[in-house]
Image (cartoon, helix red, strand yellow):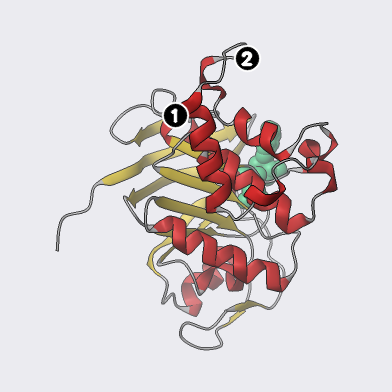
Amino acid sequence: MMKKNVAVRLEDVTVKYGDAVVLDGVNLSVFENDFLGIIGPNGGGKTTILKVILGLIKPIRGNVLVFGGSPVEKRGMIGYVPQHTHFDREFPATVWDTVMMGRMGGGMFQRFDDEDVRVSREALRTVDALEFKNRQIGSLSGGELQRVMIARALACEPRILLLDEPVASVDRRVESRFYELLVKLNKKMTVVLVSHDIGAVSVYVDKIACVNQKLYYHGDKEITAGALGKTYKCPVELIAHGVPHRVLKMHKRASK
Ligand SMILES: Nc1ncnc2c1ncn2[C@@H]1O[C@H](COP(=O)(O)OP(=O)(O)O)[C@@H](O)[C@H]1O
Ligand SMILES: [Mg+2]
């Protein structure tokens, strides 16, 4: 087998907000074409990891490499679907406008050219949303909006796609269709999916990282109950191999 290239590497990354340590000495390598699920309880630092990769938060210690460069330098190679999209819904814009905004790497007043149009159409086609490109985003269902947000992230032609809790507000049927879309995208790019819901990610991803201030586990998805229990600080029931795991009790934060 060919040796895989590293897409993202975190080395001994420590992040503080004020006095609170949010990430403590995290080491994590994401390889090209991985489909990685980052799981852990609410407040465990999952969103913070994505912001570190994007260069939005600077660690107080450690190194971050994105495709061999700094996060800020390589930001154009990262597609990002943030956790909360309710702000976008209030915004008076069509689906098409929203996806074209993903092309605005060159600043607010850049003019769009044929290439911008071509890539945006392709992004909408990929997520199966081209037929409603003229609708207002405020009129979309949760699942439709989610696909449009992914199209917007794809419009920068990323090599890695970061998604933060993307299925929090959609129903099960939409959810499985959505994961199938991610599996399809993963054939062409690296995908990192953040979720507090273990069951939601385990069937589709091929690797799992467990984060609760520290990185407790990083490896294939056949994770043990012990590693999950450590991450969530609570008893965990493992149903079966490859079948969604379930968290029984809600977690506490890792003690400081
Ligand atoms: N901007 C911020 N200022 C201060 N504390 C923050 C900030 N953002 C997040 N935190 C805290 O950092 C911890 C980790 O947050 P986050 O990375 O959002 O966790 P997760 O995404 O796993 O729920 C939480 O305790 C949260 O309250
Ligand atoms: Mg979060």
Query: How far is mark 2 from mark 1, CA to CA?
Result: 16 Å
Residue 135 in which image quadrant: top right
In primary-sequence order, the first of circles 2 and 1 is 1
> Which residue is rendered at x = 16% and y = 55% of the image?
3
Q: Is residue 79 left or right of residue 138?
A: left
Within-10-Å neighbours for mark 1: few <14, some 14–19, many 20+: some
Find disc 2 in the rendering and name its residue: 108
Q: Given the current orientation, which residue lies at the most extreme bottom position?
A: 240
Label 1: which secondary element: helix
For the residue marked with disc 1, what is the amino acid?
Gly
Reply above or below: 87 against 225: above
Residue 217 in which image quadrant: bottom left
> Which residue is rendered at x = 47% and y = 71% of the image?
227
Camera-nearest residue between 224 and 19: 224
Position in image of residue 216 (x %, y %):
46, 60
Looking at the image, is mark 2 or mark 1 nearer the viewer?
2
Position in image of residue 74 (x %, y %):
39, 28
Q: Given the current orientation, which residue lies at the most extreme top position?
A: 109
> Which residue is rendered at x = 44% and y = 74% of the image?
223
Mark 2 near ligand 1 (CB under 8 Å)? no
Q: Residue 68 has which mark? A: none
Quadrant for the N terminus in the image: bottom left
Camera-nearest residue between 6 and 33: 33
Find disc 1 in the rendering and name its residue: 76
Position in image of residue 86 (x %, y %):
80, 43
> Which residue is rendered at x = 51% and y = 16% of the image?
106
Note whether residue 52 is visible. Answer: no
Within-10-Å neighbours for mark 2: few <14, some 14–19, many 20+: few
For the residue marked with disc 2, what is the amino acid?
Met
